[in-house]
Amino acid sequence: MTKSNRRKFLGTAAAICAGTAAAAMPVSSSAKKPPMAHHVFFWLKNPGSKEDRDALIAGVKSLSKIPSVRDLRVGIVAGTEQRGVVDGSWGVSELIFFDDLAGEAAYQVHPIHQEFIKKCSHLWDKVIVYDAIEV
C-alpha cells in the first residue's frame, strides 16, 4: 500500500469511527438546565396508609404551578438492593429545580406552597431538605 493510499484509508477509517462514536452517544438537550435543586424527603405519620401517601403526592404535584418551579419530580422508595448507604425509611420525595436562589426563595413564600403546608403537614412526621447549586 502506498503512503497516499494508506493515509486515505486511515483518514476514512478515523472518520467512520468518529461518526460511529458520535452516533452511540446519548443526545442531550441544548436547553439550559436549572442549576438549583431542592430535594425534600417526607416520612409519613402513617407509613402503611396508601391514602395518606397518595394525598401527599397530590399535594406535592400541586407545587408545579408555582411560576419559579422549572421542573418537579415526585418519588417513592424504589425498593432497590439494601446496602448500608441506602436510606429507604422515607415515604415520598420531591425534587424541584429552580433557575436560582431567588426562585427558590419565591417558592417558599408563594401562596400555593403555603397552602400545601397547611393542607398536608398533618400527613408527615419528619421532613429533611437538601438544597444544592450545580458546580
Image (tube, helix red, strand yellow):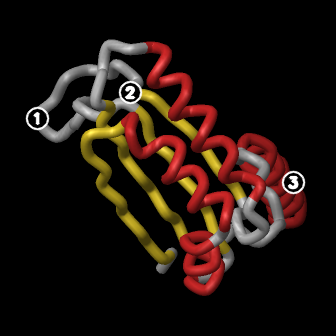
Residue tagged by mark 2? 77
**Mark 1 closeness class: few <14, some 14–19, many ≥20 residues within 10 Å:** few
Amino acid type of the residue that numbered disc 1 sits on in the rendered structure: Gly
Under circle 3, the secondary element is: helix
Task: List the residue tagged with mark 3.
Answer: 12
Earlier-in-chain disc, 3 versus 2: 3
Nearer-the-camera pick, 11 or 18: 18
Task: Using the rendered image of the protein, determine whether residue 69 is visible from the camera's viewpoint.
Answer: yes
Q: Is residue 9 left or right of residue 103?
A: right
Q: Position of residue 7 (x, y in %)?
A: 82, 63
Amino acid at the residue labelled 2 = Val
**Image side of residue 112 versus residue 13, left or right:** left
> Is residue 35 in sight in this rendering?
no
Of badges 3 and 2, nearer the viewer stands 2
- Whether label 3 touches label 2, CB < 8 Å: no
User: Which callout, 1 or 3, points at the residue further toward the start of the chain?
Assistant: 3
Please tell me how many numbered marks the rendered image carries. 3
At x 45% / y 41%, what residue is drawn?
Answer: 93
Residue tagged 1: 84
